Structures are given as C-alpha cells and as structure tokens.
Image (cartoon, rainbow, N blue to C red):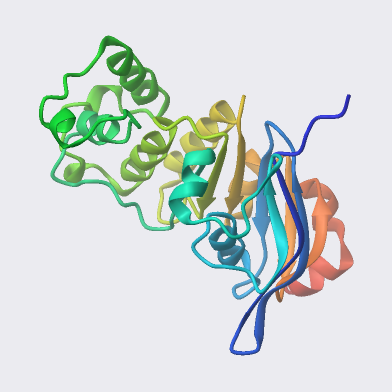
Amino acid sequence: MANKLVLQIEGLTVSFDGFKAVDNLNFYLEPDALHCVIGPNGAGKTTLLDMICGKTKPTAGKIYFKDTDITELMEYQITRLGIGRKFQTPSVYDQLTVLENLEISHPSPRGVLGSVFFSRSEVITRKIHEIAEKIFLIDHLDDVAGILSHGQKQWLEIGMLLMQDPELILLDEPVAGMSAREREKTAQLLNSISVGRSIIVIEHDMAFVKMVAKKVTVLHQGKLLAEGTLEKVQEDEQVKQVYLGH
C-alpha cells in the first residue's frame, strides 16, 4: 500500500492587491521527507509556508495535512494538529536558560496554577536531555539563551519545536548567517530529525541544499518551475535561466 501523503496542496493561490504571490500551485509531501523549496526572491516560498501554517489565508485552493483540510483553520489549531514552524529570525527567550526554553515549549496541559507549581517530571527531563544532545546544546543547558551564538539560537529554536513532537516541521532559511561549520552541523541535525517526521526547508544556500535535500521544488513567480532531485533540477534548462542566472 502506498504511503499516505503528509501534505497535499491543490490549486493553491493567494493574491495581494491583484498580485499572485502563489499561483495555482500543486505540492505533495511524503512521510519522512526532507524537501527543500528553492527559487529567487519573490518566488512565493515564504508565502507558501505562511499558508500551510495558517498565517495567510489562500484566495483559492486546498491544503490537506494527512486527511484533514486545514485551509481555513487558525494557526493554533494547525499547530495542535502537529505542524511546527520556525521563522527566519530565531525567537528564543533570551533571559531564560537553554533548559528553561526547552521546558517551556513542552505542551504539558497545565493552567495558571499548574505553571506556578510545575515540577519537572522525569519524562520531561529525559526528553529535554535527549533533544539538547541532538541540537548540540547538552553542555549549555544552564546557559542563558542570550549568550548563545546565532547558530546555537537557531538550533535551540529547532529543539523547542522538537519538544512538541510535530509530524511536520517548516523551516525558513535555517542556516542564514551561520558559519560553515554550523551549516554542516545543521545539515547533520536535519538529517537526524527527519526520521519519523517530514521537513520542508526554504533555503538559498545551494551547498546546504545539497547536504540535506531528498527532493527539491523550484518556485518562480508563485508557480512550480521544476521538481525532483537536486541533480535533476540543476540540469533543467528553465531553472538554469531563471534561478542560476544563465
């Protein structure tokens, strides 16, 4: 039996004052996929993520997460279904430690009183340590997030998403501003966390895309230009003209 799609996007369109930022787009995401979306500025990449996570509502078309139509759902409802989004700029709590940032991201059902008297369970502690190990911050659990490097903050925010166990993670330019070594470690991180979940990465850094992408979608002016392995799309004549500047 064929794997059920994690994400199914049909005829997706959004217009801003008559300008179609995304234009009749079909997009399909498989389980355990590490799928990169590339394209020049203004291609509609971030807008696509905005529509998947509910930040922007499409003008036309449908978005299905597994069997659920999420097209009209609110952002918090989409998050609860298992979709996590990381924006370009890391948004961590600078004044809290790495451990507290991870802890606060755990979706424990607790009200105001529960938050005041919250005691860290063994299960949550174990999970924090497991994730801190994955995101290369196990030795920084007691450091306040504000003193971390830019790359470490990006990893921490990915860790905060992982605390929620999303089935789909959306990452917008996760390696922007990172050193070469940090980019390599981020590739290692994404490859390790894409087992058992799917990841969509928007990225300009082609060397990084090469390190992670199982499949690549090229957008241009809101439309799908090419799709396939990185090798396949790099050989595509239209892609060469539009994206690689030939």
Q: Quadrant of the N terminus?
A: top right
Q: Residue at x 66, y 55 (%)?
A: 37
Residue that protrudes farthest toward the top in the picture: 122
| Quadrant position of the C terminus in the picture | bottom right
Query: In percent of the image, x 63 and y 40: which residue is there?
Result: 211
Q: Is residue 192 left or right of residue 246?
A: left
Q: Is the residue 166 above or below the residue 210 in the image?
A: above
Looking at the rendering, which quadrant does residue 25 occupy?
bottom right
Asked if residue 245 is positioned above or below residue 88 in the image, the reply reads below
174 sits to left or right of 125: right
138 shown above or below 24: above
Report the number of discs: 0
Q: Residue at x 62, y 25 (%)?
A: 196
Classify residue 25 as left or right of residue 201.
Answer: right
Q: Quadrant of residue 162?
A: top left
Q: Is residue 246 visible?
A: no
**Is residue 22 in sight in this rendering?**
yes
Q: Nearer the viewer, residue 31 or 219?
A: 31
Residue in the foreground of this view, choosing between 242 and 124? 124
Based on the displayed image, in which of its 4 quarters is residue 222 positioned? bottom right
Kindly identify the residue that appears in the image at 31 percent across and 30 percent down: 109
| Residue 40: percent from left, percent from top | 64, 70
What x and y, as percent, mark residue 41?
Answer: 59, 73
Q: x, y percentage for residue 132?
A: 34, 25
Q: Residue furthest bottom?
A: 17
Q: Residue 117, image x and y in percent? A: 11, 25
Image check: 203 left or right of 105?
right
